[in-house]
Image (tube, rainbow, N blue to C red):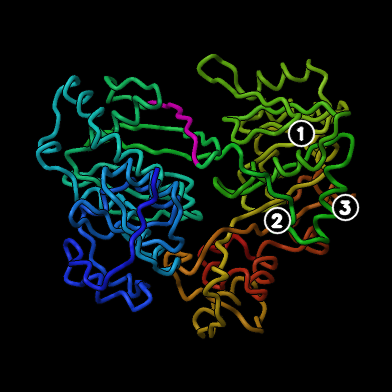
Amino acid sequence: MNQSTKTVEPDLGPVAGGVDTLGERAGLDGQLTDLAKLDLAPEIIRALPAEFVKRHGILPLAVRNGILRIATAAPGNPQVIDDIRLLSGLEVEELAAPAPEIAAKISECYSVTVEKMIENLDPAKTNGEAKNLHDIEVMANEPTVVNLVNLILATALRERASDIHLVPFENTLQLRYRVDGLLQENPPPPKHLHAALVSRIKIMADMNIAERFMPQDGHIQINHRGARVDIRVGTMPTIYGESLVMRLLEKSSRISTAEELGLDAARSKILSSLVGKPHGLFLTTGPTGSGKTTTLYSILQSIYTPELKILTIEDPVEYELPGVAQIPVRPSRNFTFATGLRAILRQDPDVVMVGEIRDSETAEIAIRAALTGHQVFSTLHTNDATGAVTRLLDMGVEAFLIASSLEGVLAQRLLRKICPNCRAEAPVTSGLRDKIEALSRRRIEGVFYQGKGCEECRHIGYRGRVGIFELLSLTPELKEMILQKRSNAELKSCAQKSMMTMHQDALQKASAGVTSLEEILRVSSGDLSE
């Protein structure tokens, strides 16, 4: 095809929907400037597909006399011009403009948000809440609802959210994303779309849309930027309809090393020696969402060799580990951690990972496996490392079994990291200093930092998370104290003679500019103190 590239004239006519003229923005060299001030009409923006515009870095500006005028930083590409002709049915006229200005304007005009979509919903198509199952199902498959669900998912992935919460109230819907451990509120969809949105997600997750009064679980698998994302869906009936939570798990995500998770080199070396033993029990502890399973994945990845047979039993399998046989529990079929652990011990494993020790039966089987030549890894919900011993005793495990099998415990929390793009020194107020010193029972000195807020962190001041840890190695002295069933306070006092506590680790990271004192105070709540 023939290329259609014309010399730019200064009187190109008004930009549709705006007051500026292209001629006023074009210099003698035909270079368009101040692109940000152009007001582009919606019909002009829709002249070309968003994906095509973003891929080629071009921006439609105006249509005049059957000619589509575009801004481009690289004019003269015959293939692009032919594609534009085909997509728009118009001839093409190119106007040169700086690439950064084009990119910024494309981002402004083509970055659809949930808020924008809600503003542009066609009331005629969404007015009135569906009452019966047939109407709900029909509405769930409406393009408006389908696109809104897709956009909610895409926004969550773009914002690095781990969970999506959709909760109904009497007159409103609440839409929140959990980012870096905290829930962030977003503009909600209209309340009358609630049933349709939930039903659409249920259809995607292969759940029963007719059942609205019992909790349900489902699973969605999507592809995002070439990566596979698994989405766990859970519904719960409330007085105003079904509440819904989606957990996002990017399966292709690389498992971080211990150092990348936040463990310093000295303790990484100790950890390697503990997990490198041929048998014994190693535990990670912390509250829900503290990264325990991720740490265990990192450990399994570090010790894997073809000579080792590694089996895991999990609820659910969150990430896939090459060379590791991973087994999901199925409580509905009476396949629990305890029954699964018994079964996999008959599979001749060298290393076993149990997703969580929840009861005395699982604890005892895991400990006996560790005593019979297996390397066993698992998690517990405790506030600190020595608390794992107390928790096992509370489960009814004999003290001599704990002392004989337990090799080490890694307790952890997750702190938000200061955004590196807007990090700056920050004064420490007397009130904050007093609270931190009360927790640590020592004076704090040095320079500390905060994030001022920028576009990179959505003006929050934090981006990403890092772990804080305390690594307990079972010494002969501690094992003797376990046999004597000494209190957790006594165990902690003995352990801290040679162990860096989580609070000490947190203060080190704050002084290094990784996190802030405010974040330490938010997470600690008193349980990180020595």
Q: Nearer the viewer, residue 515 or 41?
A: 41
Q: Earlier in the sequence, mark 1 or mark 3?
A: 1
Q: In the visual, does 87 lie left or right of 435?
A: left
Which secondary structure, mark 3?
helix
* 2 and 1 marks in contact (CB < 8 Å): no
Q: Which residue is mark 1?
A: 398
Q: Nearer the viewer, residue 29 or 509?
A: 29
Q: Which residue is mark 3?
A: 477
Quadrant for residue 444, please give it: bottom right
Of circles 3 and 2, the one toward us is 2
Q: Nearer the viewer, residue 82 or 425?
A: 82
Q: Which residue is mark 2?
A: 260
Badge 1 local density, few (<14 within 10 Å), some, or many (20+)?
Answer: some
Q: In the visual, does 29 lie left or right of 293?
A: left
Q: Earlier in the sequence, mark 2 or mark 1?
A: 2
Labels in figure, total: 3
Residue occupying the point 31% across, 53% down: 92
Q: In the visual, does 51 lie left or right of 388?
A: left
- Image coordinates of residue 213 in percent, x first then y, are 28, 25
CA gap between label 3 and label 2 equals 32 Å
Quarter of the image that includes the C terminus: bottom right
Type of amino acid under label 1: Glu
Range of magenta residues: 216-224
